[in-house]
Amino acid sequence: MPIDYLPILILVIVTTAFACLALFVPTLLGPRNPTERKLLRYESGKIPFGNTRRRFPVEYYLTAMLFIVLDIAVILCIPGRRYLEA
């Protein structure tokens, strides 16, 4: 029985190895010429000013919650595939 899970184990090992290679090879082989201008922090191409940890207005959270509620409502309104086949 455990031999039946061998392909899944091989798949997990191969994908983990590929992910590690994809993350670490570019850092080893990539160009390294950081300049002072490249190391500056920016947001959307603009130099940030003021505190970035400011509080969001309540309307932002209300809009987000409304979006989630409507998203769930749309998902629940669409019938599942098994109901369409009958």
Image: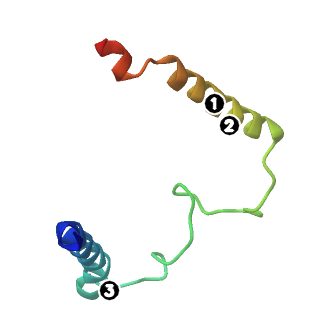
Residue occupying image coordinates x 34% and y 22%: 81
Which amino acid, mark 3?
A: Arg
Q: Depth-wise, is mark 2 or mark 3 nearer the camera?
A: 2
Which quadrant of the figure has residue 52? bottom right
Residue 48 x/y as whole percent = 65, 62
Residue 69 x/y as whole percent = 65, 29
| Marks 2 and 1 in Cβ contact (< 8 Å) | yes
Which quadrant of the figure has residue 46? bottom right
Q: Residue furthest front?
A: 1
Which amino acid, mark 1?
A: Phe
Q: Does residue 33 sit above or below 41 in this rendering?
A: below
Residue occupying image coordinates x 19% and y 72%: 6
| Marks 2 and 3 in Cβ contact (< 8 Å) | no
> What is the number of the mark on residue 80?
none
Instruction: Name the secondary structure under disc 3.
Output: loop
Left/right of residue 8 with respect to residue 55 in the rendered view: left
Mark 3, residue position: 32
Q: Does residue 26 sit above or below 51 in this rendering?
A: below
Residue 57 x/y as whole percent = 81, 42
Instruction: Name the secondary structure under disc 1.
Output: helix
Mark 1, residue position: 67
Residue 14 x/y as whole percent = 20, 73
Residue occupying image coordinates x 76% and y 34%: 62
Mark 2, residue position: 64
Q: Could you say which is closer to the camera, residue 47 or residue 56? A: 56
Q: Depth-wise, is mark 1 or mark 3 nearer the camera?
A: 1
